[in-house]
Image (tube, rainbow, N blue to C red):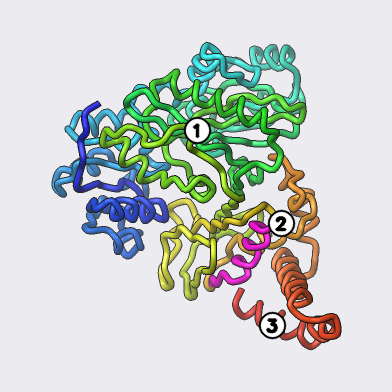
Amino acid sequence: MNLRPFKRVLVANRGEIAVRVIRGCHERGIEAVAVYSDADANALHVRVADAAYRIGPAASAESYLRADVILDVARRAGCDAIHPGYGFLSENAGFAQQVLDAGLVWIGPPPASIDAMGEKTAARRRMSAAGVPVVPGTTEPVSDPAEVVRIASEIGLPVMLKAAAGGGGKGMRRVDRAEDLANALASAQSEARKSFGDDSVYVEKFVVGPRHIEIQVLADGHGNVVHLFERDCSIQRRHQKVVEEAPSPALPEKTRQEMAAAACRAAEAVGYVGAGTCEFLLGADGAFHFLEMNTRLQVEHPITEMITGVDLVQAQLRVAAGERLWFEQSELARTGHAIELRIYAEDASSGFRPAPGPLHGYREPTGPWVRVDSGVVEGMEVPIHYDPMIAKLVVWGVDRQQAIDRAGRALRHYHVVGTHTSIPFFLALFEDPDFRAGEYDTGFISPEWLEAHLSAPGGLEGEAIAAAIAAFERDSRAAVGTDEAAEAGSAWKRAHRWSTYRRWA
């Protein structure tokens, strides 16, 4: 693989990931070109890029998913390469091939690798052949309800019906009773068709009480593959991650090594190049199973960067330019613990309903070992047309306890006015003793959990305020002597802090 350094990169994305990639380019002395829809004309990624081009109306199908328009911009802007970020066209093998055919560098894996992992049933077959353990289920799509019933009876209920071309929780249905299989199949197929243009669905054994563990891999074009350890992504709502941490608080070292080795075998089996992630389910019995490979940069990549010191965006740029990996597996080590919280414009007390709107006030937390990857500034509008994520709050600590405490402090310093956010939800989560003990799985944020934490006066906001006050008082008691502790927790001071929190929350 010959070296092919580039001077100008088009970032085919928006929001915080576009800003992140642009900054990565600038740190390597590479110019970055942004694209934007009408809804993003004043967005942060447009402001920080070296040049920006309009690509269409707000709807993503008419802008960020227009491969032809994006390629035309790359040509007109004199770009050498295209970085797709995540989402949109990032795992579209056809688009990757168009980029290469246009004589540009695709900052991602080869189209064949994307294809091999993009269709879930084909990927399951390939992984089984490579000796990577997969969840019991079908390796071909199924469409006949009677066939689904037969398969479910063989592998045992509960089962998951999953879109073969899917991701992001779309086209997924858990089924616990045989009589519900037919309706669940029709529903999953319908959602898959609307989301991906493909209604293929496969059946998979539902692993009860699993952890969602993923392994970050990095490969160059010279046959070298390494892993950068794991991330635990088990705190989810509607099958979508909201909290990630590294390392996992539940992974024995032997299992960690076996899972990491399996991830590297998976990458080698498809000729992978660049940054990618293998996702696994870790059962309560300690067995793990391959779920899928995300052939792109992950939303949660910052926590891996925090514990390893490896800049994954710059690694993508260097590998795409033809460089060999500049370190070996034995040189990689973990340091401390990192947690990422996805700050969404949504109302958790209403079923995590998106809450787009203007950011009349916006101030991000700062301080030692606090990082915020965002795509917004005060005065901007969170548009209704896209995912409502405002930012990613990432913190590091010497251990998990310090990371949690630091994240809590950062959340209490986060200032957003004009829309609901997920910040109160995280504050309530951090007060949960089971979460603090690391005892959770993918079903942790259940309807029952939400009901319990929404039942206090004022709903989740009241819970969050109470949690914030309690944490503040703990800090106060630690900072002052015993004689002053009572005064620090007096009713007058509690009332003052409550009103202050309400004014800034």
Tell me, yes or no, whether the two marked residues, 3 and 1, touch with CB atoms within 8 Å.
Answer: no
Residue wearing tag 2? 429
Q: Nearer the viewer, residue 215 or 306?
A: 306
Residue visible at 58% across and 38% down in the picture:
230
Q: In which quarter of the view is residue 181 placed?
A: top right
Could you tell me which secondary element the residue under label 3 belongs to?
helix
Tell me if mark 2 has few (under 14), some (14-19) or many (20+) residues whose alpha carbon lies within 10 angstroms of its own. many
Which amino acid, by three-letter code, is at mark 1?
Answer: Ser
Give the mark nearer the N terminus: 1 vs 2: 1
Q: Mark number for residue 499?
A: 3
Give the mark nearer the N terminus: 2 vs 3: 2
Q: Is residue 434 left or right of residue 86?
A: right
Q: In which quarter of the view is residue 343 placed?
A: bottom right
Could you tell me which secondary element the residue under label 2 belongs to?
helix
Q: Is residue 474 left or right of residue 2?
A: right
Quadrant location, the C terminus: bottom right
Prevailing SS of the magenta stretch: helix
Could you tell me which secondary element the residue under label 1 belongs to?
helix
